[in-house]
Amino acid sequence: MQAFPSASSPISAEVARQAVQWWLQLNSGKAQARQHDGLQRWRAASPEHEAAWQRIESMGSQMAGIPMPLARAALAAPGSAGRRRAVQALAVLLVSGAGSAAVVRSQAWRGWTADQVAAVGEQRRLPLPDGGSVVLNTGSALNLRYGAAERVLELVRGEILVQTAPDSLHRPFIVQTAMGAVQALGTRFTVRERASGIEVGVLQGAVQLRPAHAPHAAQRIAAGEQGTFTAQQAVHSGALDTAASAWAEGMLVASRMRLKDFLAELGRYRRGRLGCDPAVAGLHVSGAYPLADTDRVLAALTSSLPVEIHSFSRYWVMVRPAGAAKA
């Protein structure tokens, strides 16, 4: 006997996207009888389809209460980038089965619904309302909150390069992160989110690092220096690695970097998996490489190192010792 589907039944990401598309059609204000008939056929085609629709109906009040910017994007023209991002975000809500409040707080949701987003492989330069600028690195997301009392950039994920500008209202300029804040003191600086903490490099001026749970542990970082902080502490970590900001000019600069680490960094700028065989992980890489063509960078490695590039698919690439396929 076939089990009767319920709103708690497992739902795949693809079916969730289809269900969201149907929900959007019926809530567009333009739905006709053929759309309603099409939905009924789709629901009847699979128990998973029916379970997905039951979940949407059971979460009706939550779906109705999604943030307005996301709702507007979801109802945008089919095929638009904004609609695709919104559909993906709504599908996360549906697959999770969690309350909307929990999902809205999640990192994935906040990234999809951020004010500004850079795609994988993109460096995106944006002017700021006060005359300054910010560059978002690959896969980064940012919210802008300029108010009467302060200027805030909320780094949702990724990495940014900030150039501040004088403010006639003398409002402090702050980069807010999940682990604390970076206050600019007339400066040009980078902020990168890592699992272990937030890395900050100062090219001009100075900044103050303020851990979220230890405001007394604030640390000043001057031009030519770098620091890191977590929610509990801030640490001055020495002289600035100037190569760390080369990404803003579309370059990846390495100086005797371990191949494993080099590929991990390069992998941020391409979709899919970029792996490294342990047998060659300790080889050293030096040079300046253009990020606009990561396949070309990989090909260049075979000219300077005893390695080969094995592409199992467009999204799965492995760097192995030369001759590994014959071994």
Image (cartoon, rainbow, N blue to C red):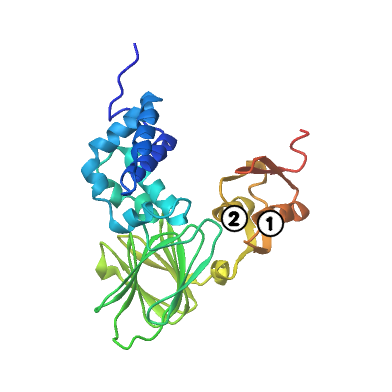
User: Which residue is at the front of the view, 191 or 222?
Assistant: 191
Whether tag 1 and tag 2 are in contact, CB under 8 A, the answer is yes
Residue 222, located in which quarter of the rendered image? bottom left
| Element marked by disc 1 | helix
On the image, the x and y values in percent for residue 34 come to: 38, 37
Residue 301 sits above or below residue 254 on the image: above
On the image, the x and y values in percent for residue 61 come to: 21, 44
**Neighbourhood count class around disc 2 (C-alpha, 10 Å): few under 14, some 14–19, many 20 upward:** some
Q: Residue at x 72, y 43 (%)?
A: 321
| Element marked by disc 2 | helix
User: Residue lying furthest front in this view?
Assistant: 33
Residue 61 placement, left or right of 254: left
On-image quarter of the C terminus: top right
Label 1 – label 2 distance at C-alpha: 9 Å
On the image, the x and y values in percent for residue 109 come to: 35, 51
Q: Residue at x 28, y 26 (%)?
A: 6
Residue 315 placement, left or right of 45: right
Q: Which residue is mark 1?
A: 297
User: Which residue is at the front of the view, 101 or 225?
Assistant: 101
Residue 213 placement, left or right of 84: left
On the image, the x and y values in percent for residue 4 come to: 30, 19
- Is residue 21 visible to the viewer in this orientation of the structure? yes
Residue 116, located in which quarter of the rendered image? bottom left
User: Residue lying furthest top in this view?
Assistant: 1
Q: Amino acid at mark 2?
A: Leu
Q: Residue at x 26, y 64 (%)?
A: 214
Q: Earlier in the sequence, mark 1 or mark 2?
A: 2
User: Which residue is at the front of the view, 49 or 44?
Assistant: 44
**Neighbourhood count class around disc 1 (C-alpha, 10 Å): few under 14, some 14–19, many 20 upward:** some
Q: Amino acid at mark 1?
A: Val
Residue 315 sits above or below residue 53 on the image: below
Q: Which residue is mark 2?
A: 266
